[in-house]
Amino acid sequence: MAYDFDLVTIGAGSGGTRATRLAASYGARAAVVEEYRVGGTCVIRGCIPKKLLVYASRFSEDFEDAAAFGWHVPHHEFKWSTLIANKDREIARLEAAYTKNMASAGAELFEDRAVLRDPHTVHLLKADKTITAETILIATGGRAWIPDSVDGGDLAITSNEAFLLPDLPHSVMIVGGGYIAVEFAGIFCGLGSKTILVHHGDEILRGFDHEVRAQMRHELQKRGVDVLIKSSVVSIRRDGPRKRVRMADGTEHLVDEIMFAVGRRPNTSALGLEHCGVEMTERRAVKVDATSRSSQANIYAVGDVTDRVNLTPVAIREGAAFAESLYNNKPTIVDHTNIATAVFGTPEIGVVGLTEERACALYPKVDVYRTAFRPMKATMTGRDTQVFMKLVIDAETDRVLGCHIVGEAAAEMIQCVAVAVKMNATKADFDATMALHPSAAEELMLLKLRVK
């Protein structure tokens, strides 16, 4: 049978655009269908706009700290509307670049909603037409959500709407304890909003090292964020222009906005996958093998929709591996171990490898080295903050199993450390590396006292 395309990708986010562009560059007749905007979560409503807001939020501390270094800043004023307008302009530029790059590679873009009719047929709802493909790639990412159990949940927002607020809220409650919740707590607090962070668990940032989790909570609290753990929202109702939030313990909070950041769910609703023999996980993610192939031989999936490792660079690498394997005769399997990740809170978190808890579960003997110290900048300003660093070591081989950093520029440091961890560097390798002074990163080379 002759198909309209060799490849049709559903979803023009980081993974989908990389896969489609590469496939087209290798000679495939490729198309991508996107119902909203090209760029996906990361570019349009995630990583990029979020970090721009993080940068903005940190100027409040910079202005305060400037006096200790001889700078006199008599007046400063923040305008939310200027920040959002400039953010929107940058996102539009990036979207145009993504679109141009795909067109330059020869890929066709359909701005439409796609629904699978069968394993080879895609129905475009807006245009009311079908296109066929030999291979279909699902790259629809994840979606923000608000629990149905919350009465009045329709009054809340998610991170999607937070990027589009017309005004900076004077007060905001953020529900959640993961990356997005912690990052937005730092953003709103730094920009001047009274900020409450609510998490149902015993500690924020589930999955991170236990000491990193505690350190970040303390840092948030020192900056003025009211962190409520073992707490949950029961209902939300209007109270004039504000929202009255009732908690499970009966207490109430009156805030301008309440934002849910309780994770993202695989975006597979109403795609027609269940009619094409595509198996799903309990969380409604597309179940795939190591090659990103689903249970239907010609349907693949990459990125957050597979719920493997939900990070933008992972989606990009999976999309590239898919294209290399199918259209460049280079079978490629993505290695999902030792992936560096960062939480762009204030301060930042950067980690790679195993937590202490996970290492102890996998290895017979684990050594732990850690330090906490006031950064040099804070010795002048008097700001109450600390840098935290931790190395987790396999005691039998001396190999570095994990590195955990909380502090300014933690993300930049951990990206470089990740190379060493990926190469199976040992603690002796770190010790033998000459320290760069004065820097925070040098402390990783100077950790001599084993604490466990």
Image (cartoon, rainbow, N blue to C red):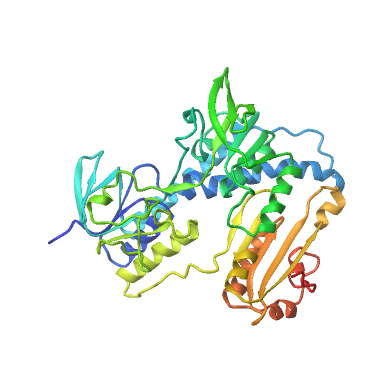
The part of the image, by quadrant, that contains residue 107 is bottom left
Q: Nearer the viewer, residue 166 or 427?
A: 427
The residue at the point 30 percent across, 69 percent down is 326
Above or below 44: residue 7:
below
How many discs mark residues in the rendered view?
0
Residue 59 image point, x, y percent: 71, 43
The answer to whether residue 70 is seen in the rendering is no
Q: Is residue 32 visible?
A: yes
Name the spot of residue 125 as percent of width and height, x first.
Answer: 25, 40
Left or right: where 354 falls relative to 94: right
Question: Which residue does the image show at 64% across and 41% down from the upper left?
Answer: 185
* Percent x, y of residue 334: 43, 69
Residue at 59% x, 43% y is 200
Of the 4 image quadrants, the one containing the N terminus is: bottom left
Figure check: 423 above or below 179: below
Left or right position of 182 against 118: right
User: Which residue is drawn at the image coordinates 21% and 56% (left, top)?
Assistant: 119
Q: Could you tell me residue 278's position as x and y percent?
A: 28, 56
Residue sitting farthest toward the front: 249
Q: Residue furthest left?
A: 1
| Location of the C terminus (image quadrant) | bottom right
Q: Looking at the rendering, which quadrant does residue 401 occupy?
A: bottom right
Relative horizontal placement of residue 2, taking residue 428 as reference (left or right): left
